[in-house]
Amino acid sequence: MAKFSFKFDHIIRIKEVLEKKILKEISLIDREIENSEAKKKALLDKKSELFEIITSGQIKVYEFKSARMHIRNLEKDVHNIEKKILELMQRREQKHTELIQKKKELKIFETLKENKQEEFFFENNREELKQMDEIAISNFIRKE
């Protein structure tokens, strides 16, 4: 019995590697989003602490101006981080779309491989049955 070999096996392997690469990129983007969210939370916590200090009246006038400037800078930083998070989410969505496309392509090749494999086994079985029939006929003829 002959061994089945699919002529597009190397393409399937490449598609699988590309799929894994995209999954890894999505994972890295997710990690970046988590880190950015943590930075944003830390900045917001720092801002609220500063705001509490200002509203409590425990600081002097010259410190008040400095604290207000610091709060504005923190707000700018938070805004920049939010923009970065949005960009990362868009990139993640783009990679997710790419991943879906790669999965579709891989599925097409895998389905094609399954169909070709079924054809191969069907033809192989047919050939074996044909050979067995010929052997049976030749044995029958010899007996007579």
Image: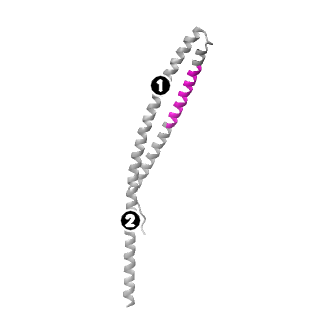
Vertical order, 18 against 2 (above or below): above
- Residue identified by numbered label 1: 80
Helix, strand, or loop for circle 1?
helix
Q: Outermost residue, bottom direction?
A: 144
Q: Main secondary structure of the magenta part?
A: helix
Is 26 colored magenta in this rendering?
A: no
Task: Pick the residue in front: 138 or 58.
Answer: 58
Does the residue at mark 1 contact the one at mark 2 (Cβ under 8 Å)?
no
The numbered disc on residue 120 is 2
Residue found at x 39% / y 64%: 118
Q: Which residues are magenta?
A: 30-49
Is 46 colored magenta in this rendering?
A: yes
Number of residue marks: 2
Q: Outermost residue, front direction?
A: 56
Residue found at x 47% / y 43%: 23
Direction from residue 136 to residue 73 in the image, left or right: right
- Point out the image quarter for the N terminus: bottom left
Disc 1/disc 2 C-alpha distance (Å): 59 Å
Closer to the N terminus: mark 1 or mark 2? 1
Task: Pick the residue in front: 65 or 35.
Answer: 65
Residue found at x 50% / y 40%: 27
Three-letter amino acid code of the residue under disc 2: Phe
Specify few, some or many for label 2: CA neighbours under 10 Å numbering under 14, 14-19, or 20 or more: some
Task: Pick the residue in front: 142 or 79.
Answer: 79
Q: Nearer the viewer, mark 1 or mark 2?
A: 1
Three-letter amino acid code of the residue under disc 1: Asn
Specify few, some or many for label 1: CA neighbours under 10 Å numbering under 14, 14-19, or 20 or more: few
Work out whether residue 13 can be spotted. Answer: yes
Q: Outermost residue, right direction?
A: 58
- Point out the image quarter for the C terminus: bottom left
Residue 76 screen position, x and y as percent: 48, 21
Residue 131 screen position, x and y as percent: 38, 76
